[in-house]
Amino acid sequence: MKKSRILSKGSDYVVYGAVNEKGEKYYTYLKKVFDAIDNKQKEYNWLITDCECYPNNEKIKELLNKEYCWVSGEELTEMVNQEDFQWIWAVLSGFDKSIELSEVLKYDLPYADGYTGFWNKPLTLQHPLSKIEIVPWDSSLTLILSEDKELVSSFMRCFPYSQNLEDYIDKTSCI
């Protein structure tokens, strides 16, 4: 039996978020996202789940066509450098390198398509052990959520039409 997604992290626990859905020709190519966060993705191990994408590279396609894959930040960076393909759906959950895959898999796997939690306040990371989540959403926008405020701020500086996710939720909840 998997553990619940809820894990108490204390009353001072805050997640920051941004949504990018304007001002770009394409939204879900990760090379530009990695550049926007100063390549901090290399500092984490990544669980990639609920993935729909169409790389030309057969090895990458095979890796991402599974229920989940676990890669280092360096491996993820190399994958994107080899081929910066479009991601349609996915949740890329970043974990401290000290956390083992076996611990991560004790919890439900994150998913994008159909997950409504991204649009609720307070913001939370879907996987309780993750530190950052990057979510290509139906190839029409990119979400970034993180415990690191500066990482989200850096993303927003590089994508000037992106919005604070909490403000976005407030605006769209009235529609």
Image (cartoon, rainbow, N blue to C red):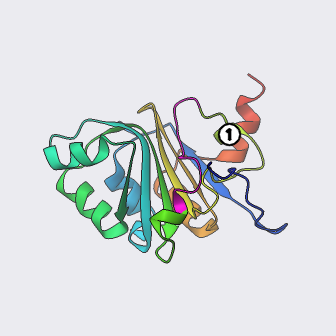
Residue 38 visible to the viewer: no
The one of 109 and 140 positioned closer to us in this rendering: 109
Q: Quadrant of the C terminus?
A: top right
Q: Residue at x 59, y 69 (%)?
A: 150
What residue span does the magenta drawing correspond to? 104-114
Q: Residue at x 75, y 29 (%)?
A: 173
Query: Vertical placement of 85 versus 34: above or below?
Result: above
Query: Vertical placement of 149 versus 54: above or below?
Result: below
Q: Residue at x 39, y 42 (%)?
A: 67
- SS majority, magenta: loop
Residue 151 visible to the viewer: yes
Query: Vertical placement of 157 versus 2: above or below?
Result: below
Q: Give the secondary structure at mark 1.
A: helix
Three-letter code for the amino acid on which mark 1 is drawn: Gly
22 on left or right of 35:
right
Quadrant of the image occupied by residue 38: bottom left
Quadrant of the image occupied by residue 125: bottom right
Outermost residue toward the top in this view = 175
| Rendered location of residue 7, percent (x, y) | 73, 59
The one of 172 and 103 positioned closer to us in this rendering: 103
- Judging by the rendered image, the residue that carries numbered circle 1 is 117
| Rendered location of residue 43, percent (x, y) | 43, 74
For disc 1, the neighbor class at 10 Å (few under 14, some 14 to 19, many from 20) is few
The one of 153 and 48 positioned closer to us in this rendering: 48
146 in the magenta segment: no
| Rendered location of residue 8, percent (x, y) | 78, 63
Quadrant of the image occupied by residue 153: bottom right
